[in-house]
Image (cartoon, rainbow, N blue to C red):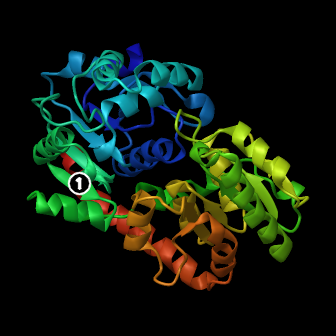
Amino acid sequence: MPDALSLSKPRTIIFGAFDRHNFGDMLFAHVVARLLAQRRPEVEPVFAGCGQRDLRAHGGHDVAALSQLAQCWRDEPVALIHAGGELLTCDAWEAAVMLTTPEEARIRIARYGSRAEDRNAWARTELGTDARAPYVIGRETFSRATSICFNAIGGATLDAREAALREEVLGKLRSGDHISVRDAPTQATLKRAGIDAQLVPDPVSLVAELFDERIRTHSDARDAFPRGYLAVQFSADFGDDATLTQIAHQLDRLGTTTGLGIVLFRAGAAPWHDDIAVYARMAARMRHPAVTIFESLNVWDICALIAKSKGFAGTSLHGRIVAMAYGLPRVNFQHADADACKQHAYTSTWEIADAPGLVPITAIHAAMREALAMDRAALHDKASALAKAHRAGFEPIAQRVLRS
């Protein structure tokens, strides 16, 4: 990535997990860059992750590896912004696997999955860092940083992670200049550790305000479904036969009672995300005639698919947040025996009080019907309020970075 490494000052790094195909993370980079550009168009940020990847073909960025930037700029003044996402709980093994191809991930999991020491050694080599939490960067990496900021980050399960990772994360946060978090449970966890963090909605709350014109030019599924459709997504860990049969039944009922089509899409193609083969298996189980699989992985196509739908149902937090940004009905679902997660943390913090939040698979039909009956003015008011709140919450970060 020679162009990124030779940019002139000011050196601003937008950092996050947009080095792999994940819908929300890829959007964070766009939102933060646009918010900075609205203030100082001449600032040309470098986009960095744990790995060097070029995701421009999918609407993302040409991403530098932070380890390379650290070697070049370790003793130089830089401003670094963690763009958002559930960064506090992603360990090195998880980060390294998600940066591989699905086939390589299967090989690595089979080889190292039960041997913690070997898998951590492999992850350190892959990522070029000894960090346990490689998506959390402090002044140990850039000792002369003019500012290190954390923008609406998440860590809903940080308390449950191993002590060594947790202490590393807290130490790095303490070296930061400004911290905002996207949910109340993460804020409470940091508060117990003596760290004050501002509560700010997720950056993707601004996607409609900042990028609607761009999104409206991208493809959706309206031509195939004149009466409209629901945008539906779920991760590959819902791919066992019994679970697929349950989801298919719920979606069949939704199609029958609403007359809407069902469009299945992926909100992430990295390992441990979504799998198009799982969708094909479920679609084969469905009786509703108006079902299709949306194949595009371009994040702007995915935004358009949701924006032009009648509502969203799925496991993706950012599928929900894009639907929220467009004032659309939305439902997240989970396994019946699942623990508390980032979806629950976010919806319990920001969602309209009587809106369906996170429901078991068996309640998808009922919850989506409830969401579809909600007052649309209230949904649009919530969208405006969250967009305004994120813009206000980003202001202290913008001021610090642009003073650099």
- Binning the other alpha carbons within 10 Å of mark 1 as few (below 14), some (14 to 19) or many (20 upward) gives some
Q: Using the rendered view, name the quadrant where residue 127 is placed.
A: top left
Residue 374: image x %, image y %? 62, 83
Which residue is found at the position 29% from the left and 18% from the top?
121
Camera-nearest residue between 106 and 350: 106
Q: In this view, does 222 lie to the left or right of 140?
A: right
Which residue is found at the position 54% from the left and 67% from the top?
324
Residue 322: image x %, image y %? 56, 59
Which residue is found at the position 78% from the left and 59% from the top?
262
Camera-nearest residue between 320 and 362: 362
Element marked by disc 1: helix
Identify the residue under disc 1: 159
Which residue is found at the position 83% from the left and 56% from the top?
286
Q: Is residue 222 left or right of residue 120?
A: right
Q: Can residue 296 be seen in this view?
A: no
Camera-nearest residue between 176 and 359: 359
